[in-house]
Amino acid sequence: MNAQTAPELSVAPPVSLGRYRLYHWQDGTFWIAMPQGKAEVPLVGVNAPLSPITLTTSHEHHALFVRNLDARKGEAALWDERVIDNVPVRWEILLEEQDGDLCMQMHFLSYGSLQAEVHFLLNLDDESLTRIFSCAHPSALIETARHTISIVTLQPATPACLRQEGEERLVWTLPPASLHQQSLHLRVHVQPCEQKGEAPVQHVEYRGSLFVPEAFSASSLKLRAAAQSAVALLLNPDRQAHLAEDQVVLWVAPGDRRFSAFTIAAAKALLDWRRFSGEESAAWTARLAMNSAMEFQVLNAQNANSGACWDTVDEHKQGADITGRRRFNLHRNAQLFQHLLLLHRDTGSELSVRVAFNGISWLLLKRGATGRYDGANVLPDGTVERGDGRGIMGAIVSVMCTAYGLTETEAYIHGANRLAEYLLRDCCQPLSPGSVMSAELPPSLQDDVFAASSIIQGLARLYRAYPHEQWRDGALRMAQWLRLWQIQADLEGVGEAGEVLAGERSPGGFVDASIEAARGALWAFSLQRDTRWFAYATRALHTAAGYLDPLAGFPDAKLAYPDHVHALALFVRAYLHWLLSIPALAPEVECDPDLLVCRYGNRIFVPEPSLWQSVRVQARGLIDWVALACPATHDVLVAVLTDGSSGAAQVHAGEHRQLATDLIGGDTGAIYPLHPVPGVGSVGVYILQA
């Protein structure tokens, strides 16, 4: 292939990319050359009839071309799209010059779970001598008469996935994985040959060490697809059972023939999901699940634990906690009653509120003589097991705040204040106001992410009810400690214990602990607009989602509570909270994850199922977006989050919504700019006026 023949074959003239030229043909192939005087030096490209990308699923093989070309000043995108296994898939090859080198990225945007192996083919100039070297990154060296060309992958690969086929072709093979994890980043460096026979291996290794792997990118996995998989698992008939004609209960886990009390948490998650997507099957399952609340509750006025709920019940309606012991867990009960109160607020269900207030009465009776909780578990005779109960008090503060919001009964908010004052004095104030060292952590909380996250959420909800600075300060001090826990994002395999989240004091971790850490960080972000909280939450959710098998849940991963219903429901609600937090990256926008609304000035924006289907957002490296509607003005709030590879987005939300106000930049027009946010990517938040 000689690039000088390109004008005869190409419909469009070559695209200038700095000191490079891109030739693109209608058959989907392309070639990149570098002008050298009056001639051109061919570098890399793809010749017909070979497709540049081949994709292999479990049962099909696809040849993918790049038939479309979008060019801007200094950059170009080759792309196409197709429906594969009923999943819309778009692939792009992005090309631009950076510091004199040619950067080439290939990635996929798909809207569903699709496992595939990808081969990306690059032809070399047929007059070149090619060799492959082993270094920190898989690399190729091309020696021509005038230049030395190194091609370096910017992702490490073990074993090396860049290999040579024949004499003229490089093949990059990506292992089978979800398309949301498939990405390739090459950098082509060209330099003149000063002396024949100079050390090419040193040159390639130098380039390999110079372009170190980029920091964690949230584009490695699309959270919406993972949340859709979690919802599908909750709706799976094989995971459901009927204790009565109008009741649905969910099995605790695959192979565990017990029913989970967190069927109620799943009901809340499914109702919230329906508010965004309009999926009626989710609402129907949620309403049947709500009717099962009493199946888990002790209803006997003579029983010392009347009002308490078992973690699980079996087919004979015999209850136990999640470990199989005959006792009640205060933390899980508090979470359950919180979900029931929120369900009552959403649906008006009298059954939900009756079960919840019976349970709250039981919680209040289990306080010790000092008004605090002296343990985490309650035995069948009503006694509280001795131990430290501080871990569950944050969850109880949240329940009391929600109950106060529904009834305006002062007793609930007074109880929340007393517990919060104890948490501040004993757990939060001993910690430093800035960076928290692990040595400062109270021993009883050093291994409990759930307790720390519950404290953050409880104090944050109390701060919303009574905005005293002490509640905010205490929540942020605890959140600083939460950041000591390191998220392990290795998705190639699960460790022996399924480690996902690990801290300085504990080498192990859990999938649902990662989700809970994300929830705590998102609440901290609502209190302090520090994007590091949002970035930490994003990474934690992506890590947990990497272990979410679309067919089995978290089959090989360790759960702190071995209850898949709890983990799946927790993930869906955390994802929706994360989604609503994207608009809050703009000044003056606030999100309320309990009400599922965003506020901007005197306007309130709520989910609208029609927007889920009608709004279309396009941007390079698109990760996720959310669209909310204002019922009073019919304006639409759109928030877009990308991985930073694009400077603008395209938003289509109807013929009459062309102009938008950029809430970050402040401009109004038909351009939707994306603004870089350190550690997050690029963000755009817009209001489209009706």
Image (spheres, grey):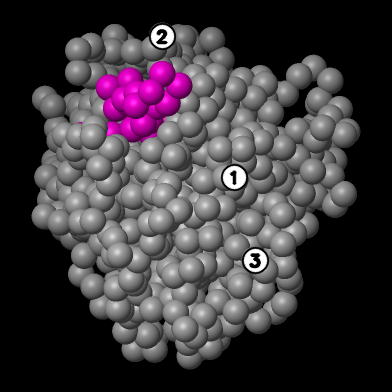
Q: Quick one: 435 or 555, which is closer to the camera?
A: 555
Disc number placed over residue 27 in the picture, else none = 2
Q: Quick one: 180 or 334, which is closer to the camera?
A: 334
Q: CA distance from mark 1 to mark 2?
A: 63 Å
Q: Secondary structure at mark 2?
A: loop
* Amino acid type, callout 1: Val
Category of crowding for the residue at label 2, using alpha-carbon neighbours closer than 10 angstroms: few (below 14), some (14–19), many (at least 20) = some
| Count of numbered tags | 3
Disc number placed over residue 353 in the picture, else none = 1
Kindly indicate the quadrant of the structure image that contains residue 560. Answer: bottom left
Say whether marks 1 and 3 touch (CB < 8 Å): no
Q: Secondary structure at mark 1?
A: helix
Q: Position of residue 166 (x, y in %)?
A: 11, 25
Q: Position of residue 353 (x, y in %)?
A: 59, 45
* Amino acid type, callout 2: Asp
| Residue 242 shows in the view | yes
Q: Position of residue 118 (x, y in %)?
A: 26, 27
Q: Is residue 457 inside the magenta stretch?
A: no
Q: CA distance from mark 3 to mark 2?
A: 69 Å
Say whether marks 3 and 2 touch (CB < 8 Å): no
* Amino acid type, callout 3: Tyr
- Report the side of 486 relative to 258 (left or right): right
Span highlighted in magenta in the image: 226-254
Q: Is residue 227 inside the magenta stretch?
A: yes
Residue underneath mark 3: 412
- Report the side of 534 relative to 295 (left or right): right
